[in-house]
Structure formats: C-alpha cells, structure tokens
Amino acid sequence: MKTSIPSQMKAAALDRFGGPEVLGMKTVTVPEVGAGEVLIKVETAGVGSWDSAEREGEMEAIKPGKSSFPYVLGTDGAGTVVAVGQGVTRCKAGDKVYASGFLNAKGGFYAEYAVVREVDTAPVPKGLSAEQAGVLAADGITALQGLQDALKLREGMTLLVYGASGGVGHLAVQLARRLGAKVVAVASGADGVELVKRLGAEKVVDGRGDADAVVKAIRDFAPDGLDAALVLAGGDVSQKALETVKKGGHIAFPNGVEPAPQRRDGVQLTAYDGKSNADVLERLNALIEAGPFHVEVSKVYRLDDAGKALEAVGKHHLGKLALRIH
C-alpha cells in the first residue's frame, strides 16, 4: 500500500501569514506518518469559521511550537486511510474515516493527504456522504462537548441553542434532541429558521428580529426559565435572550464567541474548547447512528477555490462549507 503514496501533493497553502492573497495552490511534501498516527488520502475538508484567523497568524499564540511554511490550513476532513504508523491498532489501510487535527504541526486538510493521530479519527458514520463526513469533526465535537461535558444535558431539560443554523448549532440541536432535551433555538434568517425547524427543535425564532420578540418566544416556551443555554453567537440580542436562563441554570459557550456572554448572579457560566479525543468521537458516532441525522453542507468548493470558500465562510450561510479534494 505504501508504495502507491506519492512524495509530493497539491495543497492550498501559505508561504507567510496575511490576508487572502497569501493563500494559493502549491506542491508540497506529503507528511510522514509517525507512531500512533495515520495517513489519510483526503476526499473532503471542512471550511472553518476560524480558518481566516489562522491564515492571518492569529492562532500562533496558542500553538505549542513555531509554525513552518508552506503552511496547510484545514482542521478537519474525511477520506481513506492509506498508511498507519507504529502502534496503531484501530485503523487500517482502506478504512473510511473522518478526523480532526486543530493546528496540526504536520499540516491540515486543505491537501491531498493529511496525517493525524489515530485517536483523532473515527469511522464515517453510516448514512453520511463524504462531504458531510468531511465537515463533521470539529463542529460535532464542539457541539457534543458543550452539551454533554459542559452543560451535563439530561432528559427533560429545557435548552436554548443560540446560533442554531450555523455549523456547531445545527448539529447541537439534533444531538440535544437525541439526548432528550426540549430545545428552543435562535437561528439566522428565514432560511435558518426553516432548516432548524426541520431538524427537530420544538420552537425556532429568527435572531435577526426584534430582541423583545426573541425573549418573548423563549419565555413562552419555558415560562419558569430555561435550564441551560449553548451560545454560539454573541451580541446584544444574545445577551438579552440569556436573561431567560433561570437561577441555578447553566450557560456554556465555546471560546471564540465574541462578545462572550456576561456572567449573571446565580447562573453558572462555562467557556470551553472543543477538544478531539477517541471518547468524544465514539459518543458522537453512537448518537449520529441512533437514527436519521443531517449534516448541512450548503456549498462544496474545489480545492483550487479554497480562497473563495474562506471568503464565503464569513458571510451568511447555513451549516458548513466543504472543499472537495479527490
């Protein structure tokens, strides 16, 4: 199997950090597989809302080491395992997997091949297409860790998902319903409301509307106050909506939501990072495969058009954007 792996590959990469002009198609070296790692021939990659910040060098402060160039973007993707390193036991060549590798020193998924740790890979869930699998890892992990690990969501709890039509949000709505929560969702625009209704939220309201109308809709849904809220978008309407979380309730948000929710007396506030590990991927797959599950991919771009995808990710869209590599 290893003999068919080329030494060079095409990638959307940077020679330096900066604006849109620094991202271009390059020929780079295929990364080497180390112990505990797998080499994936990438079919599709997810376009992250944070990718532009990474392109500009804003993630350097949170990296363990200094970046080297050419620098390949792309936190998550899906494809076929073509080689495994020493000590790898769960993956073998030929397996269809999806995976994540945030700020991976060996390069990202905007490339024909990517190397990640075995613990950051999982089998593609039954029923998902290559595009859906390619955009799932980072946002799926962030959604599930917010719900299960931060909020400790349980059967019968009332939950607000704020930012419900985005990448993390539309997955969180479905996962929360599967965990037995009653969900009121704030989505973006009429198309966002329509999507989130289809995904099973009991009540959906347009966050672009009047703040008082948003608050009223939530209060009608949970007259005694909400048990919990997962906040995926900041702003004045968001802060007003969070006043509906009752004393003893809990608000969680992934780091990077700006402005961050403000602390309120009697309400627990948890900021967290979505962090990949074998356990969360296993839990995610089990919940996804428990019934029909939808991953919204609103547009698929060619690898050559990675720059256009990064431009589009900053504008209104539903769910996720993907790159088609192979």
Image (tube, helix red, strand yellow):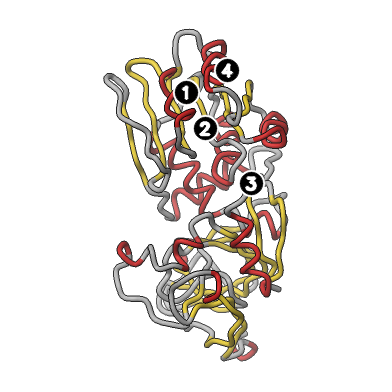
Q: Which of marks 4 and 2 is nearer the N terminus?
A: 2
Contact flag, marks 1 and 2 (Cβ < 8 Å): yes
Q: Which of marks 1 and 4 is nearer the N terminus?
A: 4
In the displayed structure, would residue 23 be above or below residue 154? below
Q: Residue at the spot x=43%, y=20% of the render?
A: 227
Mark 3, other Cα within 10 Å: few <14 / some 14–19 / many ≥20: few
- Residue tagged by mark 3? 316
Residue under label 1: 241
Residue type marked 4: Ala
Q: Which of marks 3 and 2 is in front?
A: 3
**Which residue is under mark 4?**
213
Q: Residue at x 41, y 43 (%)?
A: 258
At label 1, which amino acid type do we have? Ala
Contact, mark 3 vs mark 2 (Cβ under 8 Å): no
Give 223 or 137, whichever is nearer the viewer.
223
Could you tell me the amino acid type at mark 3? His
Residue 106 location (% of width, % of height)? 44, 76
Mark 4 and mark 2: span between their CA atoms?
A: 14 Å
**Where 125 sits versus 302, above or below?**
above
> Helix, strand or loop at disc 4?
helix
Q: For marks 1 and 2, give the CA distance.
A: 9 Å
Q: Which one is in front in this view, the residue at disc 1 or the one at disc 2?
A: 1
Q: What residue type is labelled 2?
A: Tyr
Nearest to N terminus: mark 3 or mark 4: 4
Q: Which of 27 and 211 is in front in this view?
A: 211
Of callouts 3 and 2, the N-terminal one: 2
The reply to whether dot 3 and dot 4 touch (C-beta < 8 Å) is no
Q: Position of residue 318 (x, y in %)?
A: 66, 44
